[in-house]
Amino acid sequence: MPSTNGDAAIEATDLRKVYGSAVALDGVSLSIPPGTVYGFLGPNGAGKTTTMRILTGLTQPTDGSVRVVGVDVGDRRALAPRVGYLPETPPLYEEFSAREQLDYVADLRDIPPSVADERIERYLDQFDLTDDADKRIEAYSKGMKQKTAFVQAVLHDPDVLFLDEPTSGLDPRAARRIRESIAGFADDGTTVFLSTHILSVVEAVADEVGVLLDGRLVAEGTPEELQSRAETGESGSLEDAFLAVTSDGAADVDAASASAESPTAEPR
């Protein structure tokens, strides 16, 4: 279990989420310092999206507690100005243009017009959206929509940024700009909680990595520490480490389940 840090940007304790008879999260605890890029990995169905929805206050846990920048996530009014969230399926109004979408978000976020205008123009230029900024989003490619959604998530300069597959659908140039932006936000003190299947992105920007499997956090550490768990027994790639950790974690989960179900099993 991570050590408790009263100054943590994200502090989650013993999170559980149960849907009927299905356990989506089983005792997940996190303590993430400010300014950290935290790579959150796991196979499909591991519980990553459920975790992110709980951390952003969109879903209530069955058990456990969460504070983000010292705010209980149940207090949505206090939390909303402090966090940005890019879900895997971004919420965009396709009848809007990118500029209209970002103006709308700036108004919802109470960003002063002069500040909003400067930020919008800067981000449109940074992500090569200026020439298409007044076209309807419905005509955009997936990559253009993704870039627009990323900008709207960071427009209010949040303290903590939650990103779910932020480089999905992007060409290499745009993906690099997202990676550079993540690193820049962290350098400025923003905490970034990054969930992705693209391990090269995590290798490039993450300070810490957590691996979720079957609703449990089965490994946590720096990318280098996780790489040391590769099947070769030597420092390998993060992909090698991920495969080794999830294989080991699955074996541990299976063994624990078999032990609990066996009437002759001795306590462990």
Image (cartoon, rainbow, N blue to C red):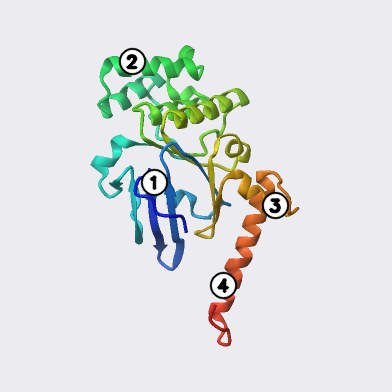
| Label 1: which secondary element | strand
The structure residue drawn at horizontal position 39% and vertical position 46%, both measured from the top left corner, is: 10
Query: Residue 94 at x, y = what percent?
Result: 41, 27
The structure residue drawn at horizontal position 45% and vertical position 58%, both measured from the top left corner, is: 28
Q: Are marks 1 and 2 in contact (CB under 8 Å)?
A: no
| Figure check: 68 above or below 62 | above
Query: Residue 126 at x, y = what percent?
Result: 49, 17
In the picture, the disc for residue 170 is: none
| Amino acid on which disc 1 is placed | Ile
Q: Nearer the viewer, mark 2 or mark 4?
A: 4
The residue that mark 4 highlights is 256
| Amino acid on which disc 2 is placed | Asp
Q: Residue furthest top?
A: 131
Crowd around label 4: few <14 · some 14–19 · many ≥20 (10 Å): few
Q: CA distance from mark 1 to mark 4?
A: 29 Å
Q: Nearer the viewer, mark 3 or mark 4?
A: 3
Query: Residue 198 at x, y = what percent?
Result: 60, 39
| Label 3: which secondary element | loop
Q: CA distance from mark 1 to mark 3?
A: 28 Å
Query: Residue 215 at x, y = what percent?
Result: 49, 59
The residue that mark 3 highlights is 230
The residue that mark 1 highlights is 10
Crowd around label 2: few <14 · some 14–19 · many ≥20 (10 Å): some
Q: Earlier in the sequence, mark 1 or mark 3?
A: 1
The residue that mark 2 highlights is 117
Q: Nearer the viewer, mark 1 or mark 4?
A: 1
Q: Earlier in the sequence, mark 3 or mark 4?
A: 3
| Amino acid on which disc 3 is placed | Ala
Q: Earlier in the sequence, mark 3 or mark 2?
A: 2
Q: CA distance from mark 3 to mark 4?
A: 23 Å
